[in-house]
Image: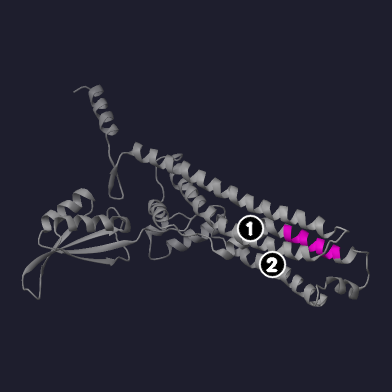
Amino acid sequence: MSPGDEASKRAAADEGTVWSYLGYELRPSDFTAAMVHLFRAEINRANVWRTRLDLTTNWAIVATATAVPFAFNDSGGNHFVLLVSSMLVSILLYIEARRYRYYELWSSRVRLMETDFFATMLVPPFRPSSDWGEALAENLLQPRFGVSIPEAVGRRLRRNYIWIYSLLLLAWLAKLWLQPEPTTSWSVFLERASLGPVAGTLIVSLYLAFFVLLLAFALVTARLQQATGEVLPTLGDLVSSVSMDRSTSEGKEAKDRAWFRHSRRRSQYLCLIITDQAKPVADQIMAEMNRGVTALQGQGMYSGEPHQVLLSAVTVTELKQLKSLVRQIDPAAFVVVTPAQEVLGRGFVNP
């Protein structure tokens, strides 16, 4: 055979190569196409929620821009409208924080694909973090907010709403101090701050205390940085975290983790299948799910009859399929499912 024929044969073999990924056989081109479509979908969804964030901020700005001129209106303006506007802006802040949590959920997926899939393509060979597939699959199967309500409120408060609140506070103080005419007396200022039977001293105390609490909340939540889509550790944090991980008992697995995100793995389970049709059940699991099966000899202590016990480790996404396969072949089979703390081996985590 000539060298040219050998090269053609190798090229044909490479073209038909099937990539085994987490126990599944998939062509690299098919996997790449699916990831590109998923990336575009998550980008679009993140953009939609980003637009909703901007919309809520616009509502708060419009409410403030309407309340301030109305309060300074000489034909009946009252500082009460500024107090109500502050309450309205607080409600909008909470709504925006909820929307921000959804935005972070979608943007974290985008960030995960950017750092572990597309970025690694630029530095051959293709070597993403060992747990990135598990992290993305867990996020798709069991979406969880990566940002708490306090962090979301604090982040939106520091970035946008602190300026809106500041404008309302200055407008409220100016309204009481300057209208209907400027005053230099603190007693007159408190008298103007009164609302019906509520004394001005109480109104001023509560309103100023509200802004002090806002400022304290913004400062306290500044250290919360769980938003993976926007906040990344500094280089110093990276070096310290890597050195700390290498000193732990997790060893190689810790070094393979991505420093820029929190690692999550799909829940893993150990299944014990007690059946009299062990060979057909095992063959079906290995053929359909590409999962390993181990057979043990057992005996029913009540009946005294021998049975075979099959052991197979699966993830949460495969559990339903395994139950269905066993039920189709042996409806009388006894299946025990128990959570596994960690599964090491091919198709799971490299030992």
| Snapshot quadrant of residue 148 | bottom right
Q: Position of residue 162 (x, y in %)?
A: 71, 60
Q: Which residues are magenta?
A: 164-175
Secondary structure under the numbered disc 1 in the rendered image:
helix
Q: Position of residue 140 (x, y in %)?
A: 41, 53
Q: Is residue 185 left or right of residue 220?
A: right
Work out whether 194 lies above or below 313. Answer: below
Q: Residue at x 81, y 74 (%)?
A: 196
Q: Amino acid at mark 2?
A: Leu
Q: Residue at x 73, y 64 (%)?
A: 84
Work out whether 103 lies above or below 177. Answer: above
Q: Is residue 169 magenta?
A: yes
Outermost front residue: 75
What predominant SS class does the magenta segment belong to? helix
Label 2: how many Cα within 10 Å (few below 14, some 14–19, many 20+)? some
Q: Is residue 167 magenta?
A: yes
Residue 228 in view: no
| Snapshot quadrant of residue 325 | bottom left
Q: Position of residue 57 (x, y in %)?
A: 66, 53
Q: Position of residue 320 (x, y in %)?
A: 27, 57
The image's mark for residue 156 is 1
Q: Residue at x 38, y 53 (%)?
A: 137
